Amino acid sequence: MSSTQFSKGPSYGLSAEVKNRLLSKYDPQKEAELRTWIEGLTGLSIGPDFQKGLKDGTILCTLMNKLQPGSLPKINRSMQNWHQLENLSNFIKAMVSYSMNPVDLFEANDLFESGNMTQVQVSLLTLAGKFSSSDPAQDHVPELK
């Protein structure tokens, strides 16, 4: 078995390596597109700071319930850190059940601690892409380019 067989990445979609090259830095235009998509679906305002607006996980959990009704029946509204991290963890688990590739997922601290907002952006763009491919009527879904 050659070592090149392990470096090819997934045979479907874009590999993490390709996505990282495409989004090697945070893209404010993609943030604006994601903001419009998320706010349009949820009816909730993210506010002026994208990271802070999503940090507690309530908007993301609401988003997942719009994409998969009932997938997150309990959303913590508490401002305690562990409740917010639980929301993010539940959202990430729901993305897995939405058939997202594990390499496309962000970790809770990527968003909570603002550690890797580029990975958060990649994850949300991938989720938006999965949603648009499952519902062709969606014409305002941001695309990964």
Image: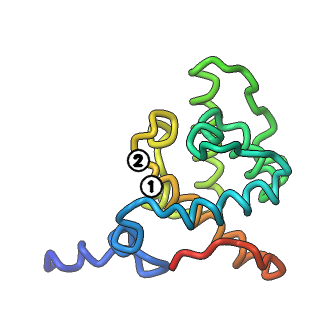
Q: Is residue 62 left or right of residue 86?
A: right
Secondary element under disc 2, as helix, strand or loop, is loop
Tag 1 near tag 2, CB within 8 Å:
yes
Q: Which mark is residue 63?
A: none
Disc 1 marks a residue whose amino acid type is: Gln
**Whole-percent x, y for residue 38 in the image:** 73, 56
Residue 39, located in which quarter of the rendered image? bottom right
Q: How is the image coloured?
A: rainbow
Q: Residue at x 34, y 72 (%)?
A: 21
- Name the residue nearer the viewer: 28 or 94: 28
**Whole-percent x, y for residue 93 in the image:** 60, 46
Q: Residue at x 60, y 43 (%)?
A: 49
**Whole-percent x, y for residue 72 in the image:** 76, 42
Q: Residue at x 65, y 66 (%)?
A: 33
* Identity of the residue furthest to the left in this view: 2
Q: Is residue 94 above or below residue 90?
A: below
Q: What is the crowding at mark 1: few (fewer than 14 residues within 10 Å), some, or many (at least 20)?
A: many
Secondary element under disc 1, as helix, strand or loop, is helix
Q: Is residue 133 left or right of residue 24?
A: right
Which residue bears the numbered disc 2? 116
Q: Which mark is residue 119?
A: 1
Disc 2 marks a residue whose amino acid type is: Asn
